[in-house]
Image (cartoon, rainbow, N blue to C red):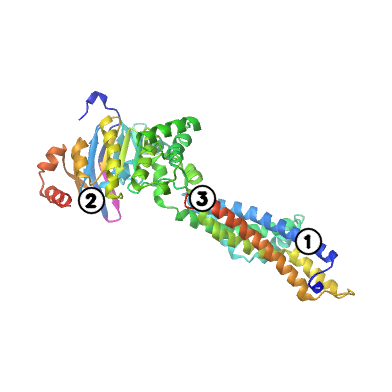
């Protein structure tokens, strides 16, 4: 899909990751490796825990067991005298600076314009000056096709526009790993395309590792390097989109794909 | 019509009392708002001892009636600690401000909790600190939720300022009281209905000023969200 020498971004390595909500084990000793610059699409029945994979990487949920490494650095652990110990918040924050996430419901800051949404974190977290952040915000909003909406509030934007601002806002932090959680699911059908166009461009650039949970099978088969079928807390099967969509090994995958593709 | 008005000296007294009342409400509002924000945020701290300290403050300052708190500040505390008694203005502001802060803290806490969780998640995805999240994202969105009940609370406290007349502070309520008492020795006593009608109107005007200020603030905060 893209020349490997162009790929940047960070690797993600999950080892024996367990996450349970009460009795409900959502991630059941999950092992997952993602290469730098790889585009991985996660599919699976709802409630299968696929969103939780992204949420534990983003530290929105903390894992119960196992380890996660980003670019070879432990996210939830620190090496102390050669022993792996639970990480301090400071350490987590330092590793987390490589990661960002785009949400199903955008979660834009409603009291700020599109430009201010994109400027806030670079100024506060990365210490950019207002001018630098402004220049960057304009570049990024141009890139997602919203150069003419700089000073619009989220309430004045359509769903597709909001989601593109949210993508620009995450890009402003220059993450090496970007997580996309059903980013087109809350959009009206006619607005899905404009968001997918932006995602397509990001995926093609190979500049970041991308992990996406999506129901857009067309997009997945076109852009993904690898598709993971996730079920009952584990990866049921995985492979390049051609193989997984056309000739899946598991009956459950076939049933799921039939159900998704039939509408 | 002449019967409706008091003489110039009496109006002068009422004006002085009104100014004292304004000082008490402004001071109480400042202290109360400071306490409301600090304690409201502290109630949501992830450190247990901070949460509990805030809870203790809120339960005490809210559970004790303002007048008892006032007498404590004015009379009991100085005796207890052998300190010189504080000026009644300070005692009044402390009592009313601490009382207001307790109610205000619950308003602030509720408003912060009413800001959608997705906002917090977005700040984590942007690697912002808790403090940055509160200051730049959550609190600005809590303000429009805080304002309407906070306006009510402020008017409640305005009415509560009349309590300071009980610790010999010459506020509006006490001035009216003094005029009434002087009636006994006066050649031309004021009809009490007229006296208290004037007092009532002054309190009403003060309450209206507060209500209007909050209305302006609400409109301005709504505009920030582009919803008007």
- Say which chain tag 1 marks: B
- Say which chain tag 3 marks: B
Residue A207 in sight here: yes
Q: Quadrant of the N terminus of chain B?
A: bottom right
Which residue is under mark 3? B223
Question: Which tag is nearer the camera, tag 2 or tag 1?
Answer: 1
Residue B127: x and y in percent read 41, 39
Decide: is B128 above or below B222: above
Alpha carbon of mark 3 to alpha carbon of mark 1: how far?
37 Å
- Say which chain tag 2 marks: A
Q: Which segment did they paint magenta?
A: A16-23
The structure residue drawn at horizontal position 30% and vertical position 37%, both measured from the top left corner, is A198
Give the secondary structure at mark 3: helix
Which residue is under mark 1? B15
Do callouts 2 and 1 mark residues in contact (Cβ within 8 Å)? no
Alpha carbon of mark 2 to alpha carbon of mark 3: how far?
42 Å
Which residue is under mark 2? A48
């Amino acid at each position: 899909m893209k020349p490997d020498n162009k790929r940047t971004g960070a690797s993600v390595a999950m080892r024996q990751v367990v996450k349970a909500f009460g009795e409900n084990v959502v991630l059941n000793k999950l092992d997952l490796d993602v290469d730098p610059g790889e585009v991985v699409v996660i599919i699976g029945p709802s409630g299968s825990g696929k969103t939780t994979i992204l949420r534990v990487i983003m530290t929105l949920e903390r894992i119960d067991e196992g380890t996660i490494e980003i670019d070879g650095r432990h996210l939830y652990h620190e090496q102390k005298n050669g022993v792996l110990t639970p990480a301090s918040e400071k350490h987590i924050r330092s590793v987390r600076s490589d990661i960002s996430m785009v949400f199903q419901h955008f979660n834009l800051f409603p009291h700020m314009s599109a430009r201010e949404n994109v400027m806030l974190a670079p100024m506060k977290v990365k210490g950019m000056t207002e001018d630098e952040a402004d220049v960057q915000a304009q570049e990024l909003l141009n890139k997602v096709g919203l150069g003419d909406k700089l000073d619009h509030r989220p309430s004045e934007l359509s769903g597709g526009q909001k989601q593109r601002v949210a993508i620009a806002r995450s890009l402003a932090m220059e993450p090496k790993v970007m997580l996309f959680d059903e980013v087109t699911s809350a959009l009206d059908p006619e607005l899905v395309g404009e968001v997918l166009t932006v995602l397509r461009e990001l995926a093609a650039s190979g500049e970041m590792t991308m992990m996406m949970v999506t129901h857009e099978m067309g997009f997945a088969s076109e852009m993904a390097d690898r598709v993971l079928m996730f079920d009952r807390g584990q990866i049921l099967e995985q492979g390049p989109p051609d193989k997984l969509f056309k000739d899946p090994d598991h009956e459950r995958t076939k049933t799921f794909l039939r159900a998704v593709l039939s509408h | 019509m002449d019967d409706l008005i008091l003489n110039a000296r009496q109006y002068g007294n009422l004006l002085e009392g009104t100014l004292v009342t304004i000082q008490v409400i402004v001071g109480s509002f400042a202290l109360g708002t400071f306490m409301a924000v600090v304690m409201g945020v502290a109630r949501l701290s992830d450190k247990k001892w901070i949460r509990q300290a805030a809870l203790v403050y809120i339960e005490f300052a809210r559970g004790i009636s303002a007048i008892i708190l006032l007498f404590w500040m004015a009379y009991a505390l100085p005796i207890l600690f052998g300190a010189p008694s504080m000026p009644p203005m300070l005692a009044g502001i402390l009592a009313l401000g601490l009382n207001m802060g307790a109610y205000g803290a619950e308003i602030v806490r509720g408003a912060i909790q009413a800001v959608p969780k997705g906002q917090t998640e977005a700040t984590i995805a942007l690697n912002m600190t808790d403090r940055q999240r509160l200051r730049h994202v959550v609190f600005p969105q809590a303000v429009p939720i805080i304002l309407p009940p906070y306006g009510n609370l402020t008017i409640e406290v305005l009415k509560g300022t009349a309590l300071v007349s009980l610790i010999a502070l010459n506020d509006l309520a006490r001035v009216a009281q003094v005029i009434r008492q002087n009636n006994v020795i006066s050649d031309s006593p004021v009809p009490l209905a007229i006296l208290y009608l004037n007092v009532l109107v002054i309190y009403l005007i003060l309450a209206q000023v507060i209500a209007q200020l909050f209305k302006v603030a609400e409109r301005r905060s709504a505009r920030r969200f582009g919803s008007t």
